[in-house]
Image (cartoon, rainbow, N blue to C red):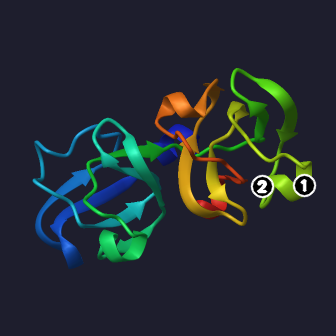
Amino acid sequence: MTSSGMNMMSKVVFYEERNFQGRSYECMSDCPDFSSYLSRCHSCRVERGCFMVYDRTNYMGNQYFMRRGEYSDFMSMMGMSDTIRSCRMISMHRGSYRMRIYERENFSGQMHELMDDCDNVMDRYRMSNCMSCNVMEGHWLMYEQPHYRGRMMYFRPGEYRNFMNMGMSGMRFMSMRRINDSCY
């Protein structure tokens, strides 16, 4: 099956209340603002595929990765202070993964190329900061702490010149993970 065929099958159902109660909204693609469908969102079921959900509209704010499964209470499970406001479908990637990380903004300073997961940037590369990246292939999650912990951010192919300009001021990325078949 082609990757576009797999993307067509992605599906998540959002609910206004915890434990899948209240009004619901079925989503099979990106949605920048839930407000026209739901007044709030506190639980969901990911039936197929993977999604990033955001606590602000237009794919802003804190991000959370969701794979197939049931999420009955966002606030207690993820430490969210509010509600889900937008979501982005993550298309399945088949092929190689490649990303260059840079110590400073605008692709300057120390550079390392990754083709697999890195659970600790400091230990592997002796790099204390990662301020920009170029994702050449695949989809990646970057975490603020080693061993895939803390706040995360989703990166798809493209150039990311300055993480602070993306609303991530004060956040350092210390581990990176590929979003691959095992996530679906």
Residue type indicated by callout 1: Arg
The image's mark for residue 81 is none
Residue, x 39% and y 75% (percent of image)?
Answer: 77
Residue, x 39% and y 70% (percent of image)?
Answer: 79
Relative horizontal placement of residue 27, taking residue 161 as reference (left or right): left
Relative horizontal placement of residue 170, taking residue 121 as reference (left or right): left
Earlier-in-chain disc, 1 versus 2: 2
Residue 29: x, y in percent? Answer: 35, 42
Neighbour class for label 2 at 10 Å: few (<14), some, many (≥20)?
A: some
The label nearer to you, 1 versus 2, is: 1
User: Residue lying farthest top?
Assistant: 106
Residue, x 12% and y 53% (percent of image)?
Answer: 38
Q: Quadrant of the C terminus?
A: bottom right
Residue, x 36% and y 74% (percent of image)?
Answer: 70
At numbered mark 1, what does the secondary structure look like: helix, strand or loop?
helix
- Count the labels in the image: 2
Res. 161 in view: yes
Residue 96: x, y in percent? Answer: 78, 41
Rendered view: 16 above or below 84? below
Q: In which quarter of the image is residue 25?
A: bottom left
Q: Quadrant of residue 33?
A: top left
Residue type indicated by callout 2: Asp
Relative horizontal placement of residue 132, taking residue 154 as reference (left or right): right
Residue 110: x, y in percent? Answer: 87, 32
Pointer 1 residue: 124
- What is the CA distance from the residue labelled 1 to the residue labelled 2? 11 Å
At numbered mark 2, what does the secondary structure look like: helix, strand or loop?
loop
User: Residue lying farthest front?
Assistant: 170
The image's mark for residue 117 is 2
Neighbour class for label 1 at 10 Å: few (<14), some, many (≥20)?
A: few
Res. 9 in view: no
